Amino acid sequence: MRTGKHYLAALNDDREIYVDGERIRDVANHPAFAPIATTIAELYDLAAEPASKMTFTAPETGAEANRVYGIPRSREDLADFRHAAETWARHTHGWVGRSPDHVATFIAGFAAHPEAFSAGERDLSANVLAYHQRLLTESRYVSYAIIPPQVSRATTAHAWDGDFVQVGVVEETPDGIVVRGAQMLATGGPVADDIFVSCIKPLTEDDRDFAISFVVPAGTPGLKFYCRRPYAPAATSSYDYPLTTRYDETDALLVFDDAFIPWENVFVDRDVAGLRRQFFETGAHVLGNWQAQIRFSVKLQFIAGLARKVAAVNGVDKFPGVVEKLGELASLAAVVESAVLAAEYTASPDEAGLWRPGKRAVYGAMGLQAELYPRALAILRELVGGGVLQVPSSVADMRNPETRSDIDRYIYSPGAPAEERIKLFKLAWDAVGSEFGGRHHQYEMFYAGAPFVVKGYAFRNYGFEGTLADVDAFLASYGVE
Ligand SMILES: Cc1cc2nc3c(=O)[nH]c(=O)nc-3n(C[C@H](O)[C@H](O)[C@H](O)COP(=O)(O)OP(=O)(O)OC[C@H]3O[C@@H](n4cnc5c(N)ncnc54)[C@H](O)[C@@H]3O)c2cc1C
């Protein structure tokens, strides 16, 4: 099994990453990326430990593989997958959205349905199967960029000023395609092995050149990563910013300057319908988003625990108003946890033998996420009050004997001396108020699509037929007479 050391060594591939106007040469040791790379390395080490029970024998290769890369072919497989995804999520307490299991799950869904990739002009199904086998064998970390840059949402790529603003095919050669343009927003991209590039937003037939999907190693010549401002370098210490200093997974706009993509890495080639088949007919979308809900559930449990602890330290946890707020938080967390389990309970095999988590449960939970997460944060924010700002400026004040005595005397709670209390409230601030916390707020609202898009998934997958029939049957049971 892949180890963290192997993963870190692979980052040294001359990838072209830009931060603050400079090209980063040593990603694994740069202050913007070392913290998250270390966390990802820990995930690989955890998976390699037999005690984590994250491995299985993959039928496709006959060799041991990490369960998160496997195709669930039974209810037991789904339970094993959930266990593996949850084991990783618990390691980061849900604060890493694009851990290697996320996109891997999409690829497993693709591989379960190779026919979705052979229905276009060119049969590319063998590429999907071969890449999935590579994931099983090499445990590669794949991130993705599947959204067109936010130029205009009133039109699509073919109508934009300037050729190839969205990534598209500029040239075809006997060996592959040459791509040019940008795509957003590869979370984890700068520290991934490969990026899966595609387009999940609907395109028109005039956008054929942009209707592509391929995987690209991060060090491919012509591929550049433009990162948003990293938060980890400005964090003064893990005591001050315990989440930022471990889990700042970065988000990057990808720019392709005529990068060459060999055919074996291409899954969809200028095929608008092929993009829709890839995401929505293979089972990839529901499987990948089930993984996301497993991770989200772990994070909500953490936030609930944090709120309860803050309330206890402040001595308010028995007040009826506070109990009500903690109860609401408990309900929010329990709803998502229940949806994760309900999706497994209502799972069923499709015609290819892929066990798909129940759509009603997965998309139902997703549809609430843009309200549910801000509400959870609002409750935590309300409970912490000014305590998150009644803390010393940094750990340096704790180390200075001149300031420490006042800190010990005035910033404490019964049973929680200054060091403990401040530690807790700084953690709460990193969750609700730091730049990292703000980015997470945006992440949970948007990672699976804008709220109107995600609610559309809930609408389409709820199964209104049954509910309508129920109402019609009731209406038919009485009348004027
Ligand atoms: C922190 C973070 C991490 C991300 N990570 C990734 C990643 O790893 N990979 C990836 O591919 N993407 C990623 N994304 C991008 C994410 O998928 C998109 O933000 C999401 O799909 C929404 O697209 P958009 O941001 O372009 O919003 P838009 O589509 O531009 O929508 C913005 C808002 O405009 C309004 N709007 C737009 N169109 C309509 C319409 N037709 N009807 C009604 N209202 C409309 C809505 O209010 C909507 O919320 C990430 C985003 C964030 C914030």
Image (tube, grey):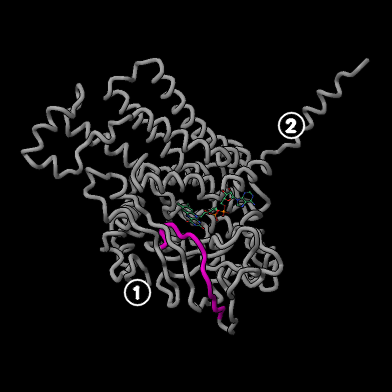
Q: Report the front residue among 68 and 95.
A: 95
In terms of secondary structure, where does tag 1 sit? loop
Q: Tell me: residue 298, above or below residue 104.
A: above
Instruction: Specify whether 162 is left or right of 329.
Output: right
Work out how far the residue at label 2 is from the one at label 1, CA to CA, in angstroms.
56 Å
In terms of secondary structure, where does tag 2 sit? helix
Of callouts 2 and 1, the N-terminal one:
1
The residue at label 2 has a CB less than 8 Å from ligand 1: no
Instruction: Specify whether 23 is left or right of 153.
Output: left
**On the image, numbered disc 1 is attached to which residue?**
14
What residue span does the magenta drawing correspond to?
A: 176-189
Q: Give how far across and how far down residue 422 sits, in percent.
A: 22, 34
**Residue 153 position by quadrant:** bottom right
Q: Give how far across and how far down residue 262 sits, in percent.
A: 53, 77
Instruction: Specify whether 124 is left or right of 407.
Output: right
Q: Tell me: residue 369, above or below residue 255.
A: above
The question of residue 33 being in magenta is answered with no
* Quadrant in which the C terminus is drawn: top right
Q: Report the front residue among 312 and 400.
A: 400
Label 1 Cα crowd, 10 Å radius (few <14 / some 14-19 / many 20+): some
**On the image, numbered disc 2 is attached to which residue?**
467
Residue at the left extreme, as displayed: 401
The amino acid at mark 1 is Asp
- Residue at image point 37% right, 35% down: 302
